[in-house]
Structure formats: C-alpha cells, structure tokens
Image (cartoon, grey):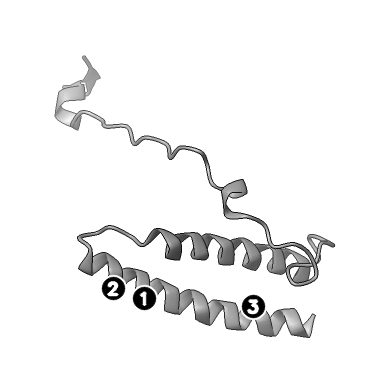
Amino acid sequence: MVIIWVMLSVAQSVLTLATIIQFVIMLINSGEPNKRLGDFGTDLGIWMAKAARYQTGASEVKPWPWTELDCTREFRPARAPRRMRMAPVSARTQNGRRR
C-alpha cells in the first residue's frame, strides 16, 4: 500500500504537469487540445481512480502494474453528447408564464 501511495503522489505531479502543458498547447492552437495528451490524461485518471479505490478498500483489484492497464477507448463514449441550446429567458417566458 505504501508503494501505491508513492505512485499516486507521483501521478498527481505528472497530472499537474500534463495540465499545464495542455493549457499552453491550447493557448498556442486557438483552443484546440492535443488529443494524445488528452488520452494520456484519461488513462492516468483511470489508473488514479483504480488506485484510490484499492487504497480505501472499495475494491480488491490492484491497479497497474499488478493488473492490466485499462484501455482508453473502453471508457470513452463513442460520440460526445451534444450541447442543447436554449432560447433566452425573455423568449421562453412572458410575465412569468411560458409561451
């Protein structure tokens, strides 16, 4: 458990560094994130979640390197959900009532 605790501490530092790098990349690329760095962040987050569940006793499944590292595509939806656009409040209501 001490080894996993140390690995979680290192992973937190790596996540912070990856976040800073992704922020700089998005500034340079007009808001476009780096896909490979995003996938890395997803994998790292999945590992951190598995490690935290093991550390707290919520799961008996040990994280990598004791088990397989899960693949990113297993946890990513095939298609991102669309954002719904809503009409401005003034267009939806009139005197507190719906049109």
* Circle 2: element type: helix
Q: Residues within 10 Å of mark 1 (few under 14, many from 20)?
A: few
- Distance, label 1 to label 2, CA atoms, is 6 Å
Spot occupied by residue 25 in the image (x, y as percentages of width and height): 29, 69
Q: Position of residue 11 (x, y in %)?
A: 58, 77
Question: Could you say which is closer to the camera, residue 59 or residue 95?
Answer: 59
> Is 10 situated above or below 42?
below
Location of residue 89 by image quarter: top left
Residue 37 x, y percent position in the rendering: 44, 65
Contact between labelled residues 2 and 3, with CB atoms less than 8 Å apart: no
Mark 3 = which residue? 8
Which SS class for mark 3? helix
Check whether the beta carbons of the residues at disc 1 and disc 2 lie within 8 A of each other: yes
The residue lying furthest to the top in this view is 99
- Pick the front one: 60 or 65: 65
Q: Is residue 79 left or right of residue 84?
A: right
Residue kind at label 3, given as amino acid type:
Leu
Which residue bears the numbered disc 2? 24
Q: CA distance from mark 3 to mark 2?
A: 24 Å
Question: To which residue does mark 1 refer?
Answer: 20
Find the distance from the CA under tag 3 to the CA under tag 1: 18 Å
What is the number of the mark on residue 28? none
Mark 2 nearby-residue class (10 Å; few <14, some 14–19, many ≥20): few
Task: Depth check: give the residue in front, 49 or 39.
Answer: 39
Going by the numbered disc 2, the residue's amino acid type is: Val
Residue 2 position in % (x across, y down): 77, 85
* 76 relative to 93 in the view: left or right: right
Q: What is the three-letter code of the residue carrying label 1?
A: Ile
Identify the mark nearer the N-term, 3 or 2: 3
Neighbor class of circle 3 (other Cα within 10 Å; few <14, some 14-19, many 20+) is some
